[in-house]
Amino acid sequence: MLGGAVAALAVAAGTTGTAQAAPGAGWPAEFPLPDGWLPEGITIGSRPYAYMGSRGDGAIYRTDLRTGKGGVLHEGAAGLASIGLKLDRDGLLYVAGGAGGTARIVDARTGVLLTTYQLTRDAAPFINDVVLHEDRAWFTDSRAAVLHGVPRGRSGEVRALPLTGEWVQAPAGTNSANGLVATPDGRGLIVVNAGQLYTVDLRSGHATKVTLNGATDVAGGDGLVRLGRTLYVVQNRLNKITVWGLDRKATTATLTRTITDPRFDVPTTAARYGDRLYLVNARFTSPQTPETTFNAVAVSL
């Protein structure tokens, strides 16, 4: 029965063409990352491997979810960052480059860098998160009212989509747009911005604020995961995940429950595998030194 439910979730989410298996009872619910890693993003495809980027130098670490053991897949370099990332069905990783203003495409099998897109020439950008939707990987820039659409594949033209309508951009120097997912009907995106959720029309860039029922905001909203009409919002410094029921067009979101765990230490983003959510602890309230320990944890859906 569980396997059928998981397969249904995969189809409803529209994120992979292959259903994920259910994690085994002996799979670890917590695993380490290298000291000083500075994680923020995590992605998982149809196979039981998690990919986690480093804010420190742009490296990418891969962990086998069955054992908790892993290693560096993609070596970093000074001046680079890997913030949000998503794994496509063809084995390509799309990586948000933070203050570098870039999107990178990395081969998830070999770790080889394939393409780098310079998304913006702004003086102080922050390319934060990414979602794969239809023919593009869409990236948020937390310092500008725009989404960047990178072609899925190794070449093509980038589309800049200015955000209009009800969008409220945070003051200069503070973060606005962060995590994003596709709407349940597939016609647009849901973006978390300064404690609120917005739907964005991908033809026009018009943003509409989502009506929240059960709470006034999603303060600290960071990574988003959507399964069908259920939206999981990681609220980083509040150390919780709020779970929301969406209507078909995502005009309203109703709070249904809250997930907390004593192992949360400023989790930023999440990725699903089977009946679990895996999250990285960014530990923003702890010293960010080469000796600081980091990990990822799993919670039940």
Image: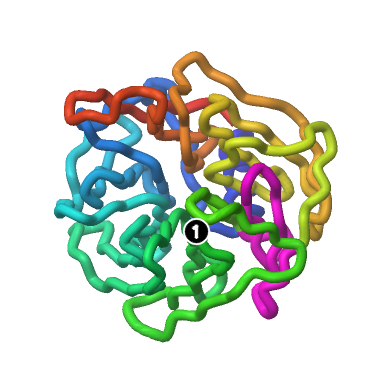
Residue 73: x %, y % from top left: 19, 49
Q: Residue visible at 44% across and 23% down?
A: 265
Would you name the residue on which mark 1 appears?
A: 143
Spot occupied by residue 80 in the image (x, y as percentages of width and height): 24, 56
* The one of 111 and 26 positioned closer to us in this rendering: 111
Q: Who's the residue at 64% across and 69% down the image?
A: 163
Q: Quadrant of the N terminus?
A: top right
Q: Is residue 145 above or below residue 33?
A: below
Residue 87 shown left or right of residue 11 in the figure:
left
Residue nearer the viewer, 186 or 166: 166
Residue 214 position (above or below residue 51): above
Q: Secondary structure at mark 1?
A: loop
Residue at coordinates 35% horizontally, 23% vertically from top-left?
286
Total residue callouts: 1
**Residue nearest the viewer, comparing 35 with 7:** 35
Q: Quadrant of the C terminus?
A: top right
Q: Is residue 91 visible?
A: no
Could you tell me the amino acid type at mark 1? Arg
Q: For residue 228: magenta?
A: no
Q: State the residue lying farthest toward the front.
A: 172
Position of residue 265 in the picture relative to residue 257 (left or right): left
Q: What's drawn in magenta, residue-wise?
A: 182-207
Q: Is residue 46 above or below residue 235?
A: below
Name the residue rendered at 47%, 37% in the picture: 268
Asked whether 197 falls inside the magenta stretch, the response is: yes
Image quadrant of residue 23?
top left
Q: Is residue 50 above or below residue 137?
A: above
Image coordinates of residue 26 in percent, x first then y, are 38, 21
Q: Position of residue 226 (x, y in %)?
A: 63, 48
Q: Quadrant of residue 67?
A: top left
Q: Is residue 68 left or right of residue 132?
A: left
Residue 22 vs residue 91: left or right? right
